[in-house]
Amino acid sequence: MHRHIFLTGITSLILLACAAQPAAAANQYDEFDISMLQDAMESGALTARELVDYYLKRIDAIDRSGPELRSIIEINPDAQSIADALDAERRNGKIRGPLHGIPIVLKANVGTGDSLATTAGSLALADHHVAEDAFLVRELRNAGAIILAKTNLSEWANFRSTRSSSGWSSIGGQTRNAYDTARNPCGSSSGSAVAVAANLAVLAIGTETDGSVICPAGINGIVGIKPTLGLVSRAGIIPLAHSQDTAGPMARTVRDAALMLAAMSAADPSDPATAGRGTPSTDYADNLSTDGLAGKRIGVIRSYSGAGDNPYIDDNFDRAVELLRAKGAVIVDPIEIDTDGMGAAEYEVLLYEFKADLNGYLADSNAPVKTLAEIIAFNTAHADTVMPFFGQDIMIMAEAKGPLTEPAYLEALETSKRIAQDGINKTLQQHKLDALVAPTNGPAWMTDHVNSDHFSVGSSALAAVSGYASITVPSGYVFGLPVGISFIGGAFSEVQIIQIAYAYEQASKARHAPQLQ
């Protein structure tokens, strides 16, 4: 077998390396996962360098040409040499773990101490290069992952304007949905989701304050995990709001997402939120079973945002619930959680924390702007390129807020956390539930820079505001557009909800790759 074949036929080569599979089973694969890649590298049929080269060609052909997905902002010029070094380690018998030699991409608000910029998608930070890796990036590098590129996002994690278009930034332009390039990828981790959906990388890191991992993962037909606040360090990530911010893995399978979570979830003394995590399990990919739904008690949320507005989503969700039941889950339907007042309180918290947290980050950085006020001034001065479609009204509202000692902030924080955490905790306890389930998203809307985003169905707020764990898994399609379901648990319930999500994924086999031309 000649390795040059790999560059034009990687899937066939990997399947040959996994020849123990029956031919009929092998032929169903149009993509590949970490296990397949590791088998191929272990057998000598594939190297990390060849895998990186394959992805660089694919990015050029699909992201920058062809359908022009525009998910990637910047390629890591060191990716090939890093791959060479990891290949040398493998030849010498050193394998760091399941991520050894696996190319990943990072949302552009995640710091890397290399030649890649850390911009949050903003031209105000176009030349911002941080001195060291974010903590989670160091963990991923130590696990053998190759940082391939930075991905586009909704500028400033979609906290600039109430009339924004998700997936648009002044650096990266408009990211396009992998299943229909006229449609929106959701955000703010838009590029990360699209890159994984289109197989431009094996894995991606997104960040979420409310929905920014879950929504783009659901709309692009992939798996996304929003970890419990404090499970993953935020050190080195451009912040939005510390009471809700977290990074999370994005992958095409639950197992791959779980492997990434295990590699990135070490405790970090520099992030106070990780102090309350105790010693949660890091074996998130272990003990995954197709029988993982048997006996699990799952509560069905029917009062999600946009409930009843789309009969196709209702039908898809009903089928998913029936599949859970058929696989042995005990279904409690419906579950009612009163969230009245949570959304308004959350928004107040985000406005206060955005100003305080961003100012703190910028003050300690080498960025050319040092405050939110300076960003607002930069945007105004460069309005033609920074604000061609929408303004910065959210930033202006945030700048008007006072310090985090103000009673208005403290009351809003207490209110939002109490409603969300009590709602989940009491519901799980009252009904003796292992998890909650709700639709993740409606079908992707047409990207519209005039009328802005058109969100429909969504269920991310409870997990986001509470700071608790959630995972979205593909559950089907509406006229060819992916929709997902989300499993939500209590604090540090990742092991349980991942097991539930894996069993559902294996039973449904809902995901198929986008047909990219």
Image (cartoon, grey):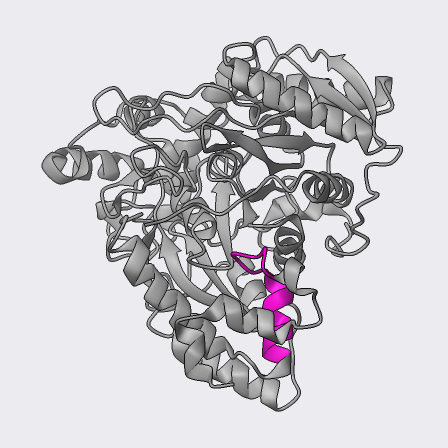
Q: Is residue 236 visible?
A: yes
Task: Pinpoint residue 494: horizontal percent, then vertical percent.
Answer: 72, 43
Range of residues picked out in magenta: 27-42
Residue at 56% across / 24% down in the picture? 461
Q: Quadrant of residue 154?
A: top left
From the viewer's perspective, tell me whether residue 106 is left or right of residue 496: left
Horizontal arrangement in the rendering, residue 153 relative to residue 407 (left or right): left
Q: Is residue 140 left or right of residue 480?
A: right
In x, y percent, where is residue 132?
Answer: 44, 65
Residue 469 percent coordinates (x, y): 67, 37
**In the figure, 246 relative to 286: above or below?**
above
Can you see residue 99? no
Tell me if residue 460 comes above or below residue 312 in the rendering.
below
Relative to 98, residue 324 above or below:
above
Task: Tell me where residue 309 appears, x and y as whole percent.
Answer: 50, 10
The front one of 238 and 106 is 106
Q: Residue at x 34, y 24 (%)?
A: 453
